[in-house]
Amino acid sequence: MTVIELVQGDITRESADAIVNAANSSLLGGGGVDGAIHRRGGPAILEECRRLRASRYGKGLATGKAVATTAGDLDARWVIHTVGPVFSATEDRSGLLASCYRESLRIADELGARTVAFPAISTGVYRYPIKDAARIAVDAVRAAKTDVEEVRFVLFDERAYEAFAARLR
Ligand code: AR6
């Protein structure tokens, strides 16, 4: 059984076995939660991302996929980088967003992570509506077959927190 917890705050301040990053396919950093994780986690994360680019992901990490690196100076053992879909009003990309959660938990299982903290993937720069994103995230985690014992959604603002809380109720 996976317990789902909700926290409002900055995911880079959380303690967990794995912290999930809402990355982009380049794996080379960006703004939002990605920028914050690299800033607080220090250069070791980017170094490993660069190595992954050079070895396995020359064309970038595909949308909906996930890959782990060290967590650098964060209070975690791993950062799991996943690439959410850019929201589209004309195309249903919910399957890709659900895949981010599923794939991240699959990687967490491979690593042996028991506690995993997620941000609200795709709801910032990638513009996914928060209510839809909360439904997709909560349902994907609930449906996942995983050994992860605790999934913690770390929501940056009150609106995101409320959307996730509403879906959990
Ligand atoms: N802790 C928790 N949540 C946060 C934090 C934080 N420190 N900072 C922002 N958020 P975004 P995306 C929330 O834009 O939409 C990057 O440039 C934020 O309020 O970080 O998946 C990447 O490199 C929002 O609810 O990720 C990609 O290019 C959520 O995290 C692109 O943005 C996601 O917002 C990915 O866009």
Image (tube, rainbow, N blue to C red):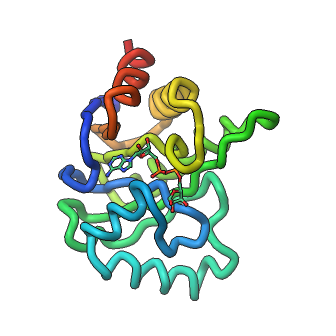
41 to 166, vertically: above or below: below
Where the N terminus falls, by quadrant? top left
Where the C terminus falls, by quadrant? top left
**Of 104 and 137, which appears nearest the observer?**
137
Tell me, yes or no, if residue 151 can be seen here. Answer: no
Asked whether, in this view, residue 93 is left or right of residue 56, the answer is right
Q: Dividing the picture into quarters, in which one does residue 44 lie?
A: bottom left
Residue closest to the far top: 169
Asked whether, in this view, residue 6 is left or right of residue 75, the answer is right
**Of 22 and 142, which appears nearest the observer?**
22
Residue at point 51% right, 30% down? Answer: 130
Across and down, in percent, residue 54 comes to 57, 88
Across and down, in percent, residue 148 comes to 34, 43
Residue at point 62% right, 52% down? Answer: 64
Tell me, yes or no, if residue 138 can be seen here. Answer: yes
**Of 37 and 64, which appears nearest the observer?**
37
Across and down, in percent, residue 20 comes to 39, 54
Q: Dividing the picture into quarters, in which one does residue 40 lie?
A: bottom left
156 to 41, vertically: above or below: above
Across and down, in percent, residue 18 comes to 31, 56
Residue closest to the far right: 90
Residue at point 50% right, 75% down? Answer: 28
Count of numbered circles in the view: 0
Q: Dividing the picture into quarters, in which one does residue 46 lie?
A: bottom left
